[in-house]
Amino acid sequence: MTASHNTYLYNSAIPTAEEALHDCVTGEIFLKPEEMQAVLNMVEIKRFEKGSLLLQEGQYAKACYYNVQGCVRQFYLKGGEEKTTFFYTEEQSISSLNSTIADTPVDYYLECTEDTILAVMSHEKEEELYSRFPRFESLCRQGLERQIAVYHNLLTSYMTSSPEERYLQLIRERPKLIHRVPQYQLASYLGVKPESLSRIRKRILTKKELRS
Amino acid sequence: MTASHNTYLYNSAIPTAEEALHDCVTGEIFLKPEEMQAVLNMVEIKRFEKGSLLLQEGQYAKACYYNVQGCVRQFYLKGGEEKTTFFYTEEQSISSLNSTIADTPVDYYLECTEDTILAVMSHEKEEELYSRFPRFESLCRQGLERQIAVYHNLLTSYMTSSPEERYLQLIRERPKLIHRVPQYQLASYLGVKPESLSRIRKRILTKKELRS
């Protein structure tokens, strides 16, 4: 996160596609000016207020997103209870591939937990870019590979670690996140009740004090 | 799984790349004959005996695999205990993107739990194909999207379901798997002790009997 990103929200200005996506599209593979322009023309930069729902259970996913600034939470409603499964923050892509590939409605919600600025691209435009510019497809292929690595690590963490280990990992890997989201959502994301998260925190604090 | 696949193992013959990958490379996007031939030339079809390790903790991943026939288990060794995190069966790709992207050794094992036939492609050859044939990259990009959808569903299942619900889901989605792998590995994959898996099975059987 750079300071320039933050200013988008403080002055409520919506950045241009060029400003918002500069780091993203120039990151991995250098795109030619005409390719860059085509990507920027196909993208819409939108501002969503805190609490906005990008997608609700039962709806079809028609677009993918790139998070310029803010936080989007994915959650499921199960027996009236919210189960948080992901927090997408800056520079992360949000897609609903399980819905688009199978052409089925999603079974979850995507909610902005902060005022959020997203780059939005429809699936039709995405496909058009793939067929026009193979280098854009390379860029996206590499992005997908990184996303798989993230999912893989997260899955592994869930399958092999205790909630306390997962909490410590989160502090190491995404230190800002634990201050950005409500504790009940964080507890749900870690797979524990809020009171268990409090106990975990106390335990960690006690261990720290004993070491110091 | 088709009968023709099974014959590879019964007669111990290793199929040609063309036989092994026919369904895979002609599946999504039609490749031109020269593209198809280039893919087939870059791929090596290998037979691995049950118990073979494709990758061990501390090694660098240098290739990706496509499972033609057999089963590959991914597991972690944690405190002397094996934690199974994935079973790759027919028509699934096996890559270690978290290792190749960050150029770090893997922290897990890939083991063939059956005699297994895999299509093997080195990362160098994969990159060469991407740059020579954009349509091959399209094919792989779509494969990655499907893989993300699989990971997403698996992750969701872990974060929102009980072990019993996960077991029922496995029976629905991969009914053959529960007969192909040892029960202690299956229990580990579901995140429970073997004795808990036995209890889950008994409970499901009792419910079935009550309904019939």
Image: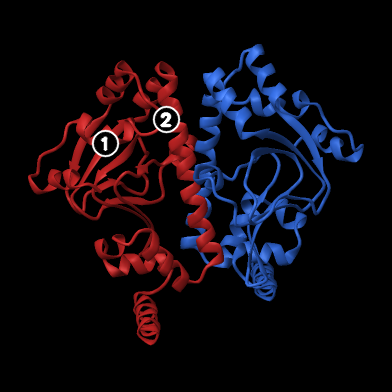
Chain colours: A blue, B red
**Answer yes or no: do the residues labelled 2 and 1 have beta carbons within 8 Å?**
no
At x 69% / y 27%, what residue is drawn?
A: A23
Q: Which residue type carries mark 1?
A: Ala
Alpha carbons under labels 2 and 1: distance apart: 16 Å
Q: Is residue B180 left or right of residue B58?
A: left
Quarter-of-image position of residue A200: bottom right
Looking at the rendered structure, whether the residues under marks 2 and 1 are on a common chain is answered as yes
Q: Nearer the viewer, residue A68 or B108?
A: A68
Quarter of the rendering occupied by the N terminus of chain A: top right
Query: Is residue B40 among the parts visible in the rendering?
Result: yes
Question: Where does residue A196 sit, x and y in percent of width and height?
Answer: 65, 74
Indicate whether B7 appears above or below B159.
above
Question: Where does residue B8 sit, x and y in percent of width and height?
Answer: 14, 43
At x 78% / y 26%, what residue is drawn?
A: A19
Q: Is residue B35 left or right of residue A98?
A: left
Task: Decide which of tag 2 and tag 1 comes sooner along the chain.
Answer: 1
Query: Pointer 2 indicates a residue of which chain?
Result: B
Q: Which residue type carries mark 2?
A: Leu
Question: Where does residue A88 sit, x and y in percent of width and height?
Answer: 67, 47
Question: Where does residue B210 sit, x and y in percent of width and height?
Answer: 39, 87
Quarter-of-image position of residue A108: bottom right
- Residue at image mark 1: B119
Query: Is residue B79 among the parts visible in the rendering?
Result: no
Q: Nearer the viewer, residue B185 or A212?
A: B185
Disc 1 is placed on an element classified as strand
Residue B139, disc: 2
Query: Pointer 1 indicates a residue of which chain?
Result: B
Q: Residue furthest front?
A: B212
Disc 2 is placed on an element classified as helix
Residue B194, disc: none
At x 48% / y 35%, what residue is drawn?
A: B101
At x 27% / y 29%, what residue is drawn?
A: B43
